Amino acid sequence: MIAATTVLELRGVEKRYPRKGGDVLACSGIDLAVAENEFVSLIGPSGCGKSTVLSLVAGLLAPTSGSVLLDGKPIDGPGPDRGVVFQQYALLPWMTVRENLAFAVESVRGKSGLAANASDVDGVLDLVHLTAAAARYPRELSGGMKQRVGLARALLVRPRVLLLDEPFGALDALTRAYLQNEMLDLWEHRPTTALMITHDIEEALLLSDRVAMMTRGPGGTIARVIDVPFARPRHRDAVMADPRFARLAAESLEHLTRELDLARSA
Ligand SMILES: Nc1ncnc2c1ncn2[C@@H]1O[C@H](COP(=O)(O)OP(=O)(O)OP(=O)(O)O)[C@@H](O)[C@H]1O
Ligand SMILES: [Mg+2]
């Protein structure tokens, strides 16, 4: 068997936010390697440091100690090799869907890249089923549509790693389930290395190849990593009906509630 290529690696990562009266320890001892086209979810109690880990990988923050490597090289700032999808949509309200996407290409590749990549915009609009909404403004879109624009924008530059911070967190349950299905479908067409933060255990099990569970803060670390056994292509109904799904969901929930109980009694 050929060993999978490691795309993203965190080694002994710690992040402290400096603050008067004492630093805030946001995460510590984070060790994680994500292989090419692997989808890893990070789950853990609120405040344990998940968004901090994502910001370190995005290059928006630098670790206090340890290293964050992309293809073996230390990350030293944001770059087009990482596409980020935020919980809130962060679309430019005065631009249409198509203009928002074109602007994203322009800002990472420079103006010259724009014309050559008009077909990329069409391709990605098709991928997230938004072709018919290309000329609409963000205010004319539903929450689910806006989040699909966010996903399209992140995919557009064909990032080496896709970073998702609670991408469906702001959506109602039905839209959320719909987008999860679309995401599974998308992965069949375009597998991408991904690191996703979620609070939703079932979402993590449905979408990921591995789920990394963090301990409570301050200074959360990865306590346990679950290998998700469901073969791809995946379909929601088949995954949900698999007895291993219920077992893994119960185990994960037990871990998370234990962490919350510990936090409460601390
Ligand atoms: N810019 C900052 N300055 C100081 N402290 C911060 C900053 N950002 C986050 N923190 C603190 O670091 C810790 C980890 O925060 P982080 O946002 O990474 O948690 P999280 O796991 O993403 O939480 P949630 O699930 O609520 O989004 C928290 O104690 C938080 O208060
Ligand atoms: Mg967060």
Image: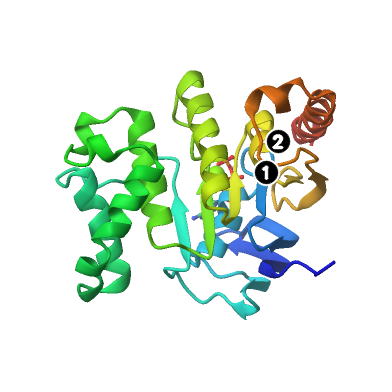
Quarter of the rendering containing residue 201: top right
Task: Please say if the residues under marks 1 and 2 sit with CB atoms less than 8 Å apart.
Answer: yes
Q: Name the residue under label 2.
A: 205
Quarter of the rendering containing residue 237: top right
Q: In this view, does 67 lie above or below 173?
A: below
Which amino acid type is shown beneath numbered disc 1?
Ser
Which residue appears at 18% of the width and 38% of the height?
137
Closer to us: 92 or 105 = 105
Report the quarter where the N terminus lies. bottom right
For residue 208, which numbered disc appears in the image? 1
Which residue appears at 57% of the width and 53% of the height?
191
Q: In the image, 26: left or right of 113?
A: right
Which amino acid type is shown beneath numbered disc 2?
Leu
For residue 260, which numbered disc appears in the image? none
Q: In the image, 107: left or right of 52?
A: left
Q: Is residue 28 above or below residue 227?
A: below
Q: Is mark 1 on a helix, strand or loop?
A: loop
Closer to us: 119 or 95 = 119
Q: What element carries label 2?
A: helix
Report the quarter where the C terminus lies. top right
